[in-house]
Image (tube, rainbow, N blue to C red):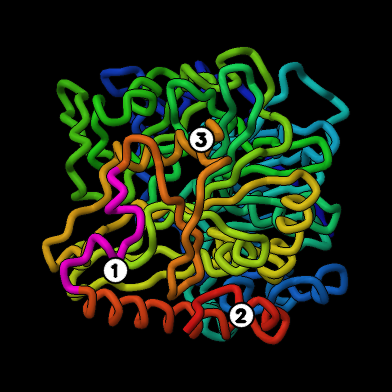
């Protein structure tokens, strides 16, 4: 492939320090400095990822491994080559500065991926500097194993002829170890783009790539993993003053243990409250990058409750901005094999138990299902709970069939004798429209603490009848009445109706994964 060449009079900055980037962002009018010292920028028309515009080139290296479909859409090599050439011409002829990040994805020295990200906007480099692992000293011999070229000003005028979704494109060529981005400024495309690449490369080496948060005990042992979709409490529950954070979003599980893919965090800031989430609030300082927040132009004070730009306001910052992270103790973001795994769900039907223990096949079934529920009233037209399923709790980023990840998870769980729990942070005694309440964060934390401290090791369990889930008979500090969900319902008949309805949705969803997963069907709902 033709190599990337820059215009002779354009300035190329490779891994410039944060102070220089602040100056460049201000000079280019890309952003403003907030009262806390954090940089504030807008991401243009797109304030979130564009999953319908993501493609993989169909080529000989990866085509027999990729899980083709709506997540990984095929695109012809000719289309990629034409758009790649268009981007090369843009970089060759545009005189504006070029910003290059060179570093790593993965804190395990054996499995880390050397990456290069090239961009025209200073803030996009800033984002990469926060999210990936920086090189401590200059390395003239650095050789990337994957490159993303960001040309957000370039669009595909021929997208209809190319049978693509829009003029926006995020295209991966795994054989050539390169991806190109056009038409969208949103930095999350680069973050999740590298995540998708790791989801392809690592499982083929026996390393499980995971969309989860992770922490350890005060002695940096007893690793715990937290899987969960948005709104289930993954970040909140893994951010614990008594347990140092490994990372909040992306991890690998190798023969050596668990390691963070990233060098930073990317947190939502909508309705951010200092009392409720002090760690994130305090991380917003010099070196943090805020996206699409609303602020007073005179005082530079942010209104975190204002969603007039987007509901998806965000902040990226280095891990050492979190006071109780491994990085804050000058440790690498990695730890030993996990002792406990927690699947988080927010069940708005009021059906699933607040806490239950899973056997190996149930673990695979619920991992592949990746269930949570949208809550009635949170979106226009939503009048009752809507079941949402995302395989492996990270469907948009999987590049291989979900069963590949599930079987790898099962293999590691068996080898290291890991216990797995399903924790429901949703409603109890009914759904939201019935007037039922959400399980209190206090009760959820008591259950999490009971799991991680081993208080449930000698507890008796009772199986509920619809999903076959094993419910502990006792959790210290938690009212026994709420442990088995049917006991919290005044109208038992209504509970049965809702349970059967949800069980049916689980079964229907599981069909889409094909015959490969049929042997796990009996590990799901019993009806």
Q: Circle 1 sits on which residue?
A: 349
Tell whether position 299 is magenta: no
Does residue 224 appear in the picture of this structure? Answer: yes
Q: Of callouts 2 and 3, which one flags the residue occurring earlier in the amino acid sequence? A: 3
Dot 3 falls on a residue whose secondary structure is: loop
| Distance between the alpha carbons at the discs numbered 1 and 2 | 22 Å
Question: Which residue is disc 2 drawn over?
Answer: 521
Q: Are marks 1 and 3 in contact (CB under 8 Å)?
A: no
Q: Mark 1, residues whose alpha carbon is within 10 Å: few (<14), some, or many (≥20)?
A: many
Name the outermost residue toward the top.
329
| Spot occupied by residue 138 in the image (x, y as percentages of width and height) | 77, 19
Quadrant containing the N terminus is bottom right
Which residue sits furthest left? 435
Crowd tier of the residue under label 2, counting other residues whose Cα lies within 10 Å: few below 14, some 14–19, many 20 or above: some
> Is residue 17 positioned above or below 83 on the image?
above
For numbered disc 1, what is the local secondary structure? Answer: loop
Q: Is residue 491 left or right of residue 411?
A: left
The residue that mark 3 highlights is 455
| Res 440 quadrant in image | top left
Of label 1 and label 2, which has the lower sequence position?
A: 1
Residue ID at (59%, 30%) = 246
Q: Give the magenta part as a residue range.
A: 479-491
Asked where in the image residue 262 lies, by quadrant, the reply is top right
Q: Position of residue 435 (x, y in %)?
A: 11, 62
Disc 3 crowd rating (10 Å Cα; few below 14, some 14-19, many 20+) is some
Whether 316 is drawn above or below 183: the answer is above
Q: Can residue 47 be seen here?
A: no
Residue placed at 32% from the left, 41% from the top?
478
Viewer-proximal residue among 116 and 312 = 312
Above-or-below relation of 122 to 148 = above
């Amino acid at each position: 492939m033709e190599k990337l060449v820059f215009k002779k009079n354009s300035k190329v900055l490779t891994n410039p320090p944060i102070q220089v980037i602040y100056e460049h962002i201000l000079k280019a009018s890309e952003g403003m400095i907030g009262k806390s010292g954090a940089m504030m920028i807008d991401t243009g028309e797109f304030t979130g990822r564009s999953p319908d515009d993501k493609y993989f080139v169909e080529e000989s290296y990866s085509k027999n491994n990729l899980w083709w479909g709506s997540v990984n859409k095929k695109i012809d090599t000719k289309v990629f080559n034409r758009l790649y050439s268009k981007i090369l011409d843009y970089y060759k002829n545009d005189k504006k500065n070029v910003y290059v990040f060179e570093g790593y994805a993965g804190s395990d020295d054996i499995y880390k991926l050397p990456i290069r990200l090239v961009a025209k906007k200073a803030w996009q480099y800033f984002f990469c500097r926060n999210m990936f692992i920086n090189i401590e000293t200059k390395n003239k011999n650095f050789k990337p194993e994957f490159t993303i070229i960001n040309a957000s000003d370039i669009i595909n005028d021929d997208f209809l002829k190319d049978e693509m979704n829009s003029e926006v494109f995020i295209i991966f060529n795994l054989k050539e170890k390169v991806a190109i981005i056009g038409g969208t400024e949103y930095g999350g495309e680069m973050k999740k783009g590298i995540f998708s690449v790791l989801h392809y490369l690592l499982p083929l080496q026996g390393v499980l790539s995971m969309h989860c948060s992770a922490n350890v005990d005060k002695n940096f042992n007893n690793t715990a993993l937290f899987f969960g979709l948005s709104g289930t409490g993954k970040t909140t529950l893994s951010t614990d003053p008594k347990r140092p954070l490994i990372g909040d979003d992306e991890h690998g599980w190798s023969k050596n243990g668990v390691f963070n893919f990233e060098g930073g965090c990317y947190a939502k800031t909508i309705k951010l409250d200092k009392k409720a989430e002090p760690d994130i609030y305090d991380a917003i300082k010099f070196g943090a990058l805020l996206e699409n927040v609303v602020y007073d132009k005179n005082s530079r004070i942010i209104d975190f409750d204002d969603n007039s730009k987007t509901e998806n306001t965000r902040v990226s910052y280095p891990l050492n901005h979190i006071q109780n992270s491994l990085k804050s103790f000058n440790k690498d973001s990695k730890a030993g094999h996990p002792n406990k795994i927690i699947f988080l769900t927010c069940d708005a039907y009021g059906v699933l138990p607040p806490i239950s223990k899973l056997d190996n096949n149930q673990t695979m079934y619920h991992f592949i299902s990746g269930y949570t529920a949208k809550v009635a009233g949170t979106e226009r037209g939503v009048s009752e709970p809507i079941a949402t399923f995302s395989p492996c709790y990270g469907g948009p980023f999987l590049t291989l069939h979900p069963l590949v990840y599930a079987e790898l998870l099962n293999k590691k769980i068996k080898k290291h004798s890991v216990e797995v729990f399903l924790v429901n942070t949703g409603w109890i005694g009914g759904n939201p429209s019935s007037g039922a309440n959400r399980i209190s964060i206090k009760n959820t934390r008591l259950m999490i603490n009971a799991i991680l401290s081993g208080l449930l090791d000698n507890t008796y369990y009772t199986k509920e009848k619809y999903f076959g889930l094993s419910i502990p008979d006792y959790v210290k500090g938690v009212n026994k009445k709420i442990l088995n969900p049917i006991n919290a319902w005044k109208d038992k008949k209504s509970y049965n109706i809702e349970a059967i309805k949800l069980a049916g949705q689980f079964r229907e969803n599981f069909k889409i994964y094909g015959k490969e997963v049929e042997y796990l069907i009996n590990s799901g709902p019993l009806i």
